[in-house]
Amino acid sequence: MLKKTAKTLLCLFLALCTVSALLTFGAAAAAGSGDADNDGRVTAADARLALRCSVGLETLGSSAKAAADMDGDGRVTAEDARRILRKSVGLPPEGQLTEKDLPADAKILYLTFDDGPSARTAEVLDILDRYNAKATFFVVNGYSYNYMYKEVVDRGHSIGLHSYTHEYSDIYRNTDAYFNDLNKISDAVYNVAGVRTNLIRFPGGSSNTVSRSYCRGIMSVLTKEVERRGYVYFDWNSDNGDATGVTMTAYEMYQTAVAYAGPSRLVMLMHDASYKGTTVKALPMIIEYYQSHGYYLIGLNENSPTAHHYVSN
């Protein structure tokens, strides 16, 4: 009796294993090729097609949808678009794209967000996910929102250091004051996200002249000293207008941002502080415009263009 029961259980176990293997094989077999436009190649155009489908801007036929469904889950999502994009440049499906992964003549938009994290940061991250876009967040002490440091990193974005206090009168008093503040924000990011980053952005940019009120000539010193200590500082060569202090509608921000289109490398200044709700509203329009004009949206790294300003302090 015991032998018969054991034999029955063994048969059931083997049957379950067979079914599981078949289901796994079926899911793998259902994964798409990535060639959504059926031109015989997997290119960035296929990724854009999949991305537009994922947000309802494009309706794909059954064969195109099957090709774009890279994970075989029956849906075309931003994740599928990301996988197609990586396949188009010969990369495995996981990991963050950098300049070396893209064609030499690729147009790249580096979206950068200063002064977060805040209540707006989650909204920004969700929009970026929707469009399979990566960005860079230059962070401050966000107090109860500091847990977002890890969320930024976990979602595959770049994280940089902006300032702990963002108080010009404090951080620009002298060199020691600046680095004390920088070390504090570096430690805060490390304690939450578990990463050390050498990407930084000066409050006000390297061209700010407010710092001269507290220590004349300090920016000339700091721009050299941060590099000596192994940091890479980034300014910007485009923006959406949300730092001007002028009240703008979302469409006006969109118009400001897209006016910079043309150059192959754009580092765009934006903000994800709590009072930047209009920036969040304008973001999808800006992303759609640049993606439709052939730009890759990726995060900054230490080898990216720094868009340095002229130091005038």
Image (cartoon, rainbow, N blue to C red):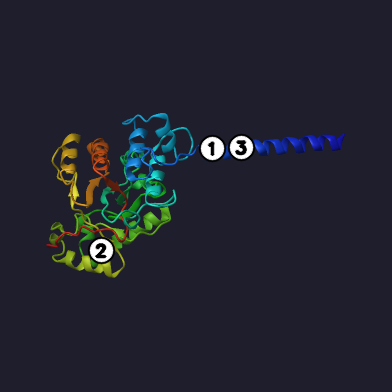
Give the structural element (helix, strand or loop) at label 1.
helix
Where on the picture, by quarter, is residue 309? bottom left
**Percent from the top left, x then y, of residue 35?**
39, 40
Q: Is residue 287 left or right of residue 258?
A: right
Hey, what amino acid is under mark 1? Answer: Ala
Give how far apart the Cα atoms at labels 3 and 1 are: 9 Å
How many marks the image carries: the answer is 3
Hey, what amino acid is under mark 2? Answer: Ala
Quadrant of the image containing the C terminus: bottom left
Q: In the rendered image, which residue does mark 3 sit on?
A: 22
Q: Nearer the viewer, residue 18 or 143?
A: 18
Of the numbered discs 3 and 1, the one sitting upstream in the chain is 3
Mark seen at residue 27: 1
Of the numbered discs 3 and 2, the one sitting upstream in the chain is 3
**Percent from the top left, x then y, of residue 229?**
30, 69
Q: In the rendered image, which residue does mark 2 sit on?
A: 177
**Percent from the top left, x then y, of residue 73?**
48, 35
Q: Residues within 10 Å of mark 3 (few under 14, many from 20)?
A: few
Q: Are marks 2 and 1 in contact (CB under 8 Å)?
A: no
Where on the picture, by quarter, is residue 204? bottom left
Q: Are marks 3 and 2 in contact (CB under 8 Å)?
A: no
The mark closer to the camera, 2 or 1, is 1
Hey, what amino acid is under mark 3? Answer: Leu
